[in-house]
Image (spheres, rainbow, N blue to C red):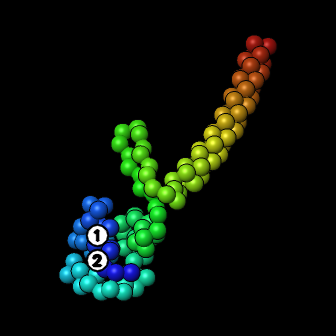
C-alpha cells in the first residue's frame, strides 16, 4: 500500500491530513512522513480507516460503497454494497423494538385494567358502608 494512494483517497473524500492526524493523535508532519513510504504498515492503514470511516477495502483498491445523506434521502453508490446489510440489521433492530414496545403497551393495559378493577371494588365497598 502506497502512501500516495492514501493521500489521494483522503483528498477525494474531502478529508485533510491534519484532521486525520488529530484523530490518530499524531502530528500532521509525522503522518505526512509516514505516508511518504511506498509500503505502509497494515496497522496504519487500519487506523486511518477507523479514523476516517472509509472502508479499509477502499485503500486497497477494492470496490466499496459510499453513502451520503441529505435531509430525508440517502444516495448509495459503489459495488460490494454493505449498506444493504446495515439497513437489514437496522430494520431487524427496529422490528425488535416495535415488538418490545407492543409488549410494554399490553402490560400497561393489563395494569390499568387491574387498577380500574381495584378502584371499582373500592368504590363498591365504600357504597356498602
Residue nearest the observer in this picture, 28 or 3: 3
Q: Is residue 69 left or right of residue 116?
A: left
The image quadrant that residue 50 belongs to is bottom left
Q: Which residue reaches farthest top? A: 127
Disc 2: CA contacts within 10 A as few (<14), some (14-19) or many (>=20): some
* Residue 4, position as x, y percentages in the image: 28, 77
Q: Which residue is mark 1?
A: 8
- Residue at image position (63%, 48%) is 92
Q: Position of residue 123 (x, y in %)?
A: 73, 17
Residue 22, visible in the rendered structure: no
Q: Residue at x 43, y 52 (%)?
A: 77
* Left or right: where 123 falls relative to 6: right
Q: Is residue 125 left or right of residue 53?
A: right
Where residue 52 appears, as percent x and y from the top left, is: 36, 66
Query: Badge 1: how crowded within 10 Å, few (<14), some, or many (20+)?
Result: few
Which secondary structure lies at badge 1? helix
Which type of secondary structure does the marked residue at label 2 adopt?
Answer: helix
Q: Quadrant of the N terminus?
A: bottom left
Query: Which numbered dot is residue 4?
Result: 2
Q: In the rendering, which numbered label is found on residue 77?
A: none
Reply above or below: 51 against 34. above
Identify the residue shown where x is 24% and y is 72%: 17
Residue at 37% across / 69% down in the picture? 51
2 and 1 marks in contact (CB < 8 Å):
yes
Q: What is the residue that sits farthest to the left in this orientation?
A: 29
The quadrant of the rendering that contains the C terminus is top right
Against 63, is 107 above or below? above
Amino acid at each position: 500500500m502506497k502512501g500516495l494512494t492514501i493521500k489521494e483517497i483522503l483528498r477525494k473524500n474531502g478529508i485533510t491530513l491534519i484532521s486525520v492526524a488529530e484523530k490518530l493523535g499524531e502530528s500532521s508532519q509525522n503522518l505526512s512522513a509516514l505516508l511518504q513510504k511506498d509500503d505502509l504498515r497494515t496497522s496504519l492503514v487500519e487506523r486511518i480507516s477507523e479514523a476516517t470511516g472509509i472502508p479499509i477495502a477502499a485503500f486497497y483498491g477494492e470496490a466499496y460503497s459510499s453513502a451520503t445523506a441529505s435531509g430525508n434521502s440517502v444516495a448509495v453508490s459503489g459495488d460490494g454494497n454493505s449498506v444493504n446489510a446495515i439497513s437489514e440489521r437496522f430494520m431487524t433492530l427496529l422490528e425488535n423494538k416495535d415488538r418490545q414496545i407492543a409488549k410494554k403497551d399490553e402490560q400497561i393495559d393489563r395494569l390499568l385494567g387491574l387498577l380500574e378493577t381495584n378502584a371499582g371494588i373500592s368504590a363498591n365497598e365504600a357504597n356498602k358502608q
